[in-house]
Image: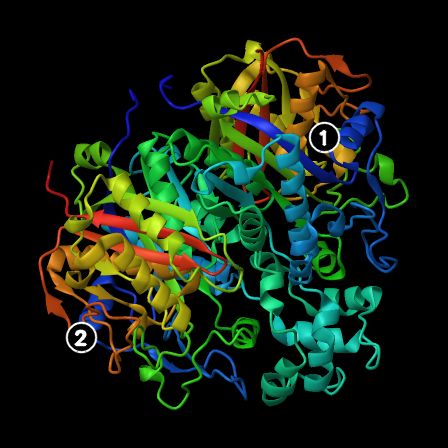
């Protein structure tokens, strides 16, 4: 077909993660196998079944925004992390100065998550406004108590479109502005669809990625009720053990990952440093169950295949797979089956590892942070391990790069992100050859 | 834009709105000039500063959902139920049975906003962990006794991606799936994205749209804290007045809309009836909230469509009925078109602000207008506002005389989207 599809490269990266707020530090931690998981301190985890998480440590927005940070003191952690990670990403790309380039051709696409619900006001307010026997909340009483107890600015910051608006406004990115939330696939989806805006000439630059924190009482409540979280409170750094037979739930993480996606010619014209090319994107739905992914991995297979087709690559060209690898029974089994279905016998020769063994699961932000790790792996030639892999599971019999990083030059990396509810996204990053 | 891209047409409409469930009552209400804004009946709003809304009264999801799927309804908040209901409606209107086609070639791109928790569900845990509201939450108690009295699937009832998930499961749609969360502009952005997905060859059919419900104590309490609502509680039908000088704030609403987007040859092969072709879309951030972003979104959509202002029959505006945002929109339209600005239709007088599905639901009025040859009047436009120098269509319906319509949506934080649709002529 006679239609021009522009090529998309990555020209800047920034992160805020449980393993540091520099791309270099994050990657170094990953190849050294350091864990970011510890006891929850953001709130009192009391007697929750799960009392551990991968928290971002010592975060202060002022470190990144200076005095401007006070404007966002009521913003959710998602927005604060996004604002913090966007700055080094844009600076890295040479696009931080609002005078650099045509800002109307630069947009934002994030898997942005929601702000934080005010648990500590909401719960007592509900109790005050409901009869202890009938347990029905009186609406007018709720308004009376709620409107005086809730902070208007914090309430506004819960809305899911605040994060992308703040990032666009602060960094003068006046092009298309999208946020999506496909659970754990969101930031990968944002990168894929953001790249499409560039391919289609609707923008020259998209700041793409994600930001999220569900390390709050409602988040842990929700996932504990679903029994999706690890309850290995005694040894936090061992709790996330993807593909290991003992795996028993994921560990909640938080943070942000930002990538500057750019039209190749645009990047070359301005002499930008090019980290890698984003060559493939696949998106599918399991259409199976709300609570589980499809056991035969059909959605994941189709999604990885879609990414390969998009990139014009054959399966044997993939040198490393950065797995979704959540450390839940269902995901890790299904993902392993899907990889074998798609890659056939060759699946056993492809290193597959899970960043989540150290980082925890950054939910909407996970895919973007993991893609940053993939780009570094392309550049450095060292594949990060799956930590805590000790007891093999016969259903998970691939090469998971157990416990030790591995030197290997790879040219194409596939990164998987599968969202709760059955949305699947795969991305492929490729070494940029200069042509 | 190269003509070699696959073409995207709209072949089905499903609407659940304050002015009717389904296309026929919806269309009859707008042609009769009936507003759906009424006193809130879903809960006792006596003590609220906002006591009127665009409600979908009498909505019963069971009407729309097969018996075998009904047990999943208890896993869905009201807005999710609406999203599911409306997708079945749209597929029916499109005369499209997904089971007759390759499931991997049908996808979904939906919009959603925050979904408010049902407060009653949290009440048992709230009582045990706060000594009936006398003390702050005791985290030791919440983590055990509190959790023990919560429904196990509680969180799934409120996740914004769930409308898309349930719809994909119910109709076995295995193609691309995304949920856009840009508040009042989400529905139109999902349509723009679904168009791109069809154009890049990933799907033959995309279900797009959104669902939202803000008519509950938690949402209205929260929104009252930071959103400017109307004070015209005593005059609901005339409260929402886009671009009118007497407008005084937003009227909350709820609803759902689903538009079926289809690749043209796929639609033709199955002899589908076509409402229109999506020929252009654009998005931008209005960073200074002065209309420049709206203008750029319009210009991008018009450029992609390859048409001029003179070819537009009308603009289907966002029209919040908000003192500032309507001025901002008028500036954006003027900046894009100058004195040549086509006449403007604004739908919120009928619907209120139904949130993320507003864009597609309002566009549905223009689609039906192109089909019937007549566009309803904007409701409650009585006193022109010099700050909004637009030709706002009001009074009587007007005949459709040109082939294109431009739809605008934007959010209170400046996210903008514009879409151009061409009337379909066989």
2 and 1 marks on the same chain: no
The picture places residue A118, in percent across and down from the top left corner, at: 61, 69
Q: Which residue is mark 2?
A: A32
Residue farthest right in this picture: B234
Residue B366's quadrant in the figure? Answer: top right
Residue A24's quadrant in the figure? Answer: bottom left
Up-down: is A250 above or below B407? below
What residue is rendered at 54% in x and 60% in y?
A: A290
Looking at the rendered structure, the number of numbered marks drawn on it comes to: 2
Up-down: is A148 above or below A206? below
- Please tell me how crowded label 2 is: few (under 14), some (14-19), or many (20+) other residues with Cα within 10 Å: some
**Considering the image in quadrants, where does the N terminus of chain A appear?**
top left
From mark 2 to mark 1, how far is it between C-alphas?
Answer: 58 Å
The answer to which of A249 and B403 lies nearer the viewer is: A249
Q: Which residue is mark 1?
A: B347
Secondary structure of residue under mark 2: helix
Secondary structure of residue under mark 1: loop
The picture places residue A148, in percent across and down from the top left corner, at: 73, 67
Q: Chain of mark 2?
A: A
The picture places residue B50, in percent across and down from the top left corner, at: 80, 51
The picture places residue B49, in percent across and down from the top left corner, at: 81, 54
């Amino acid at each position: 077909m006679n239609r021009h599809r522009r090529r998309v490269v990555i020209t800047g990266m920034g992160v805020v993660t449980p393993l540091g707020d520099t791309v270099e530090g994050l990657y170094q931690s990953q190849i050294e196998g350091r864990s970011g998981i510890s006891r929850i301190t953001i709130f009192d985890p009391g007697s929750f079944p799960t009392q551990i998480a991968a928290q971002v440590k010592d975060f202060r927005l002022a470190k990144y925004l200076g005095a401007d940070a006070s404007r966002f003191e009521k913003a959710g952690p998602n927005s604060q992390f996004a604002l913090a990670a966007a700055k080094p990403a844009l600076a890295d790309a040479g696009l931080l100065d609002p005078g650099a380039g045509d800002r109307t051709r630069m947009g934002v696409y994030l898997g942005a998550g929601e702000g934080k619900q005010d648990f500590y006001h909401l719960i007592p307010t509900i109790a005050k406004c409901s009869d202890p026997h009938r347990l029905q909340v009186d609406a007018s009483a709720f308004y009376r108590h709620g409107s005086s107890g809730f902070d208007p600015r914090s309430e506004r910051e819960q809305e899911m479109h605040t994060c992308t608006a703040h990032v666009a406004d602060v960094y003068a990115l006046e092009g298309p502005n999208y946020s999506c939330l496909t659970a754990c696939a969101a930031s990968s989806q944002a990168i894929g669809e953001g790249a499409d805006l560039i391919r289609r000439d609707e923008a020259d630059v998209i700041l793409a990625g994600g930001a999220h924190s569900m390390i709050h009482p409602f988040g842990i409540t929700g996932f504990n009720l679903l029994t999706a979280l690890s309850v290995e409170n005694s040894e936090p750094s061992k709790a996330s053990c993807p593909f290991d037979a003992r795996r028993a739930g994921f560990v909640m993480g938080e943070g942000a990952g930002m990538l500057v996606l750019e039209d190749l010619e645009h990047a070359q014209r301005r002499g930008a440093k090019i980290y890698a090319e984003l060559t493939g994107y696949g998106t599918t739905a399991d259409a199976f169950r709300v609570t589980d992914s499809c056991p035969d991995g059909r959605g994941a297979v189709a999604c990885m295949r879609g990414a390969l087709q998009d990139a014009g690559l054959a399966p044997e060209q993939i040198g490393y797979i950065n797995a979704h690898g959540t450390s839940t029974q269902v995901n890790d089994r299904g993902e392993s089956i899907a990889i074998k279905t798609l890659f056939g016998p060759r699946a056993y020769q492809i290193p597959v590892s899970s960043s989540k063994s150290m980082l925890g699961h950054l939910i909407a932000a996970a895919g973007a942070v993991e893609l940053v790790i993939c780009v570094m792996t392309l550049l450095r030639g060292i594949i990060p391990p799956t930590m805590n892999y000790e007891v093999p599971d016969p259903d998970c019999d691939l090469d998971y790069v157990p416990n030790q990083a591995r030197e290997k030059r790879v040219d194409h990396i596939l990164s998987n992100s599968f969202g709760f509810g059955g949305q699947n996204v795969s991305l492929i990053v490729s070494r940029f050859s200069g042509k | 834009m190269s003509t070699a891209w696959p073409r995207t047409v709209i072949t089905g409409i499903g609407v659940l709105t304050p002015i009717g469930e389904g296309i026929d009552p919806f269309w009859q209400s707008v042609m009769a000039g009936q507003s759906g804004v009424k006193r809130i009946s879903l809960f006792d709003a006596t003590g609220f500063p906002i006591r009127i809304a665009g409600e979908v009264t009498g909505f019963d999801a069971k009407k729309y959902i097969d018996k075998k799927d009904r047990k999943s309804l208890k896993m869905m908040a009201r807005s999710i139920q609406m999203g599911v209901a409306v997708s079945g409606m749209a597929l029916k209107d499109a005369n499209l049975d997904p089971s007759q086609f390759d499931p991997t070639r049908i996808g979904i791109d939906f919009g959603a906003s925050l979904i408010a928790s049902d407060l009653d569900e949290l009440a048992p845990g709230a009582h045990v962990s706060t000594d009936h509201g006398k003390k702050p939450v005791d985290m030791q108690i919440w983590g055990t006794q509190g959790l023990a009295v919560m429904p196990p699937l509680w969180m799934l009832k409120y996740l914004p991606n769930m409308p898309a998930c349930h719809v994909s499961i119910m109709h076995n749609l295995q193609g691309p799936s995304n949920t856009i969360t840009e508040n009042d502009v989400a529905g139109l952005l999902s349509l723009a994205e679904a168009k791109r997905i069809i154009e890049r060859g990933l799907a033959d059919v995309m279900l797009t749209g959104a669902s939202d419900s803000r008519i509950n104590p938690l949402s209205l309490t929260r929104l009252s804290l930071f959103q400017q609502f109307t004070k015209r509680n005593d005059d609901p039908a005339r409260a929402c007045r886009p671009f009118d000088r007497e407008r005084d704030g937003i009227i909350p609403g709820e609803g759902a809309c689903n538009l079926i987007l289809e690749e043209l040859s796929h639609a033709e092969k199955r002899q589908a009836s076509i409402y229109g072709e999506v020929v252009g879309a654009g998005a931008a951030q209005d960073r200074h909230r002065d209309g420049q972003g709206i203008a750029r979104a319009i210009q991008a959509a018009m450029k992609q469509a390859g048409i001029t202002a003179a070819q537009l029959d009308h603009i289907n505006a966002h029209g919040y009925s908000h003192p500032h945002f309507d001025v901002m929109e008028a500036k954006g339209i003027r900046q894009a078109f100058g004195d040549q600005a086509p006449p403007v239709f604004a739908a919120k007088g009928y619907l209120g602000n139904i949130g993320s599905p507003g864009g597609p639901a309002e566009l549905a009025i223009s689609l039906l207008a192109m089909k019937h040859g007549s566009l309803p009047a904007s409701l409650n436009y009585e006193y022109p506002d010099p700050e909004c120098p637009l030709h706002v269509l009001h009074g009587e319906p007007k005949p459709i005389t040109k082939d294109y319509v431009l739809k605008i949506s934007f959010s209170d934080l400046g996210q903008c989207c514009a879409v151009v649709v061409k009337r379909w002529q066989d």
